[in-house]
Image: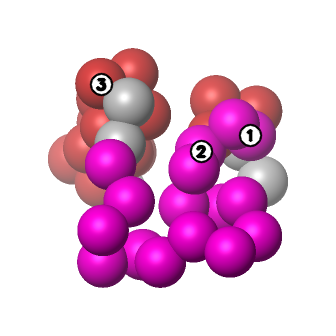
């Protein structure tokens, strides 16, 4: 797990992936990783 995503709501128990919002910083981290993959 990446520390940048440790507080991500999607990873918390009981949340549904399809309706879980992302924090702007989480989105930036994820998209940056995808672009440089």
For the point 76% across and 70% down, the residue is 13
User: Would you identify the image quadrant in which residue 22 lies?
Assistant: top left
The residue that label 3 is drawn on is 24
Earlier residue among tags 1 and 3? 1
Q: Which mark is residue 8?
A: 2
Q: Position of residue 2 (x, y in %)?
A: 72, 43
Secondary structure at badge 1 equals: loop
> In the image, is residue 32 above or below residue 12?
above
Q: What colour scheme was applied to this rendering of the protein? A: secondary structure
> In the image, is residue 6 above or below residue 1?
above
CB atoms of marks 1 and 2 within 8 Å:
yes
For the point 68% across and 74% down, the residue is 14
Question: Does the magenta run of residues contain 2?
Answer: no
Secondary structure at badge 2 equals: loop
In front: 17, or 2?
17
Q: Which mark is residue 6?
A: 1
Earlier residue among tags 3 and 2? 2
At label 1, counting other C-alpha atoms closer than 10 Å, the crowd grade (few under 14, some 14-19, many 20 or more) is few
Question: Does the magenta run of residues contain 8?
Answer: yes
In front: 29, or 15?
15
For the point 30% across and 68% down, the residue is 19
Q: CA distance from mark 1 to mark 2?
A: 6 Å
For the point 59% across and 44% down, the residue is 8
Q: Which residues are magenta?
A: 6-21
**Which residue is situated farthest in the top direction here?**
25
Q: Quadrant of the C terminus?
A: bottom left
User: Would you identify the image quadrant in which residue 20 lies?
Assistant: bottom left
Q: CA distance from mark 3 to mark 2?
A: 11 Å
């Amino acid at each position: 797990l990446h520390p940048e995503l440790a507080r991500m709501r999607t990873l918390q128990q009981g949340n549904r992936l399809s309706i879980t919002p992302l924090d702007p910083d989480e989105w930036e981290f994820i998209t940056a990783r995808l672009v440089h993959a």
